[in-house]
Amino acid sequence: MMQLIATKRPAAEKYDRLNFVRDDGSSAAIDMPRQGILPHDLLHYLLETGLGLCGGFLSLVAAGQDARYVMELVHAPDRRDILRDAVHAEALVEAMQTQLWSGCYDHQAFLYGLQTASEFRGIESPLAPSQDRCMALFEAAIALNRQWSALPAYQTLVLEFPSANAK
């Protein structure tokens, strides 16, 4: 299991911090921009684990890839063919983010967000999860956001992400 250690920084800061500690003890870290909802990278955790995605952002980091390099690849439209699964995971996360910003889950809006996020990257949309599955993930995101929001500055939230070896 790879540990994700999310650290809340003081309110005046623009970023929180996410550290990754892999099975082999190696680590990586990234800043998480504050967006008023569950941080994007923690939403990756929910969707990648909740949908059993392999090859997404966190799977690549767990396998030893540099987190910043993977972030650049999945956000670069001209590199979409290299990491198709990671780009699909990114589109799913972005589509769910729009639902969190709206404050309620709308499956048709989610599907539209998934389609537009995929089209922007020049790839076909991944197979969309069922409405019930998406609603459950949305509710899990709301619950994790409550937990994250309640953390005081300098406190951490630790999550376990299954490594490639454990799958």
Image (cartoon, rainbow, N blue to C red):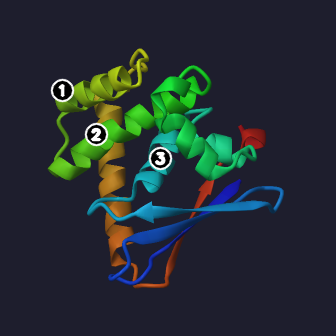
Can residue 130 be seen here? The reply is no
- Give the CA distance from mark 1 to mark 2: 12 Å
How far apart, in angstroms, are the residues tagged by discs 1 and 3? 21 Å
* Residue at point 71%, 45% (across, down): 65
Q: Secondary structure at mark 3?
A: helix
The relative height of residue 33 versus residue 67 in the rendered view (above or below) is below
Dot 1: element = helix
State the residue position of label 2.
135
The residue pinned by badge 1 equals 108
Residue density around tag 1, few if under 14, some if 14–19, many if 20 or more, within 10 Å:
few
Q: Earlier in the sequence, mark 3 or mark 2?
A: 3
To which quarter of the image does residue 111 belong? Answer: top left
Tell which tag, 1 or 2, sits nearer the viewer: 1
Q: Three-letter amino acid code at disc 1?
A: Gln
Tell me, yes or no, whether the two marked residues, 1 and 3, touch with CB atoms within 8 Å.
no
Q: Residue furthest top?
A: 124
Judged by depth in the image, the label closer to the viewer, 3 or 2, is 3
Up the image or down, 106 lies above or below 151; here it is above
Q: Quadrant of residue 29?
A: bottom right
Q: Residue 152 vs residue 50: left or right?
A: left
Q: Secondary structure at mark 2?
A: helix
Task: Look at label 2 and name its amino acid.
Answer: Met
| First in residue order: circle 1 vs circle 2 | 1
**Residue 8 position in % (x across, y down):** 45, 76
- Disc nearer the start of the sequence (1/3): 3
The location of residue 145, given as percent across then percent down, is 34, 63
Q: 78 and 149: which one is in front?
A: 78
Q: Quadrant of residue 127?
A: top left
Mark 2 Cα-neighbour bin, 10 Å: few <14, some 14–19, many ≥20: some
